[in-house]
Amino acid sequence: MDYVASGTIHVRTKVCGRNNCRCAHDPDARHGPYHEYSRRLQGRLRHSVVTPQQADLLSRAIANYREIQSLLARWERETVAEILNAENTDDDNQ
């Protein structure tokens, strides 16, 4: 794994707010797509507009982060099960 990051990537289109722009009346004419990276930083939700290339790298980093979280959860479950089974075996031998 090369990159690790938590968060989410969103691909959005936007309305510019000008009444005479096509995007105000036609959803297919909205501006974008824009790639937005959202994550928690120091307890606050932060958003950054990123390039499509950055979005691809961040998507890979987010997938890596989720895989690590999954592996850690599995490792924790297996550790607890092993320790509890070892204690039950020790109790049976006494």
Image (cartoon, grey):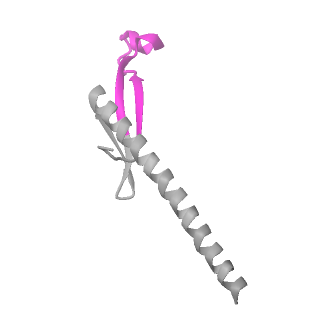
- Is 50 positioned to the left or the right of 10 in the image? left
Q: Nearer the viewer, residue 56 or 77?
A: 77
Task: Say which quadrant the C terminus sits in.
Answer: bottom right
Determine the image quadrant of residue 84: bottom right
Q: Residue furthest front?
A: 93
- Give coordinates of residue 32: x percent, y percent: 35, 19
Q: Measuring 41% from the left and 27% from the top, which residue is drawn there?
A: 11
52 displayed left or right of 44:
left
Picture quadrant where residue 38 is located: top left
Q: Which residues are magenta?
A: 8-37
In which quadrant of the rendered image does the N terminus lie? Answer: top left
Q: Is residue 25 above or below residue 78?
A: above
Residue drawn at x 34%, y 25% as measured from the top left: 34
Q: Is any part of residue 4 visible from this angle?
A: yes
Residue 83: percent from the left, percent from the top? 58, 74
Is 48 left or right of 24, judged from the image as shown? left
Q: Is residue 32 above or below residue 37?
A: above
Q: Position of residue 27 (x, y in %)?
A: 47, 14
Query: Is residue 59 positioned above or below 92 on the image?
Result: above
Q: Is residue 39 above or below residue 58?
A: below
Task: Examine the image and state in which quarter residue 23 appears.
Answer: top left
Q: Measuring 33% from the left and 38% from the top, which residue is drawn there?
A: 58
x and y, in percent, of residue 56 in the image? 33, 31
Q: Residue at x 36, y 34 (%)?
A: 36
Decide whether residue 50 is among the magenta residues: no
> Camera-side residue: 55 or 38?
55
Of the pair 56 and 44, the residue shown nearer to us: 56
Q: For residue 36: magenta? A: yes
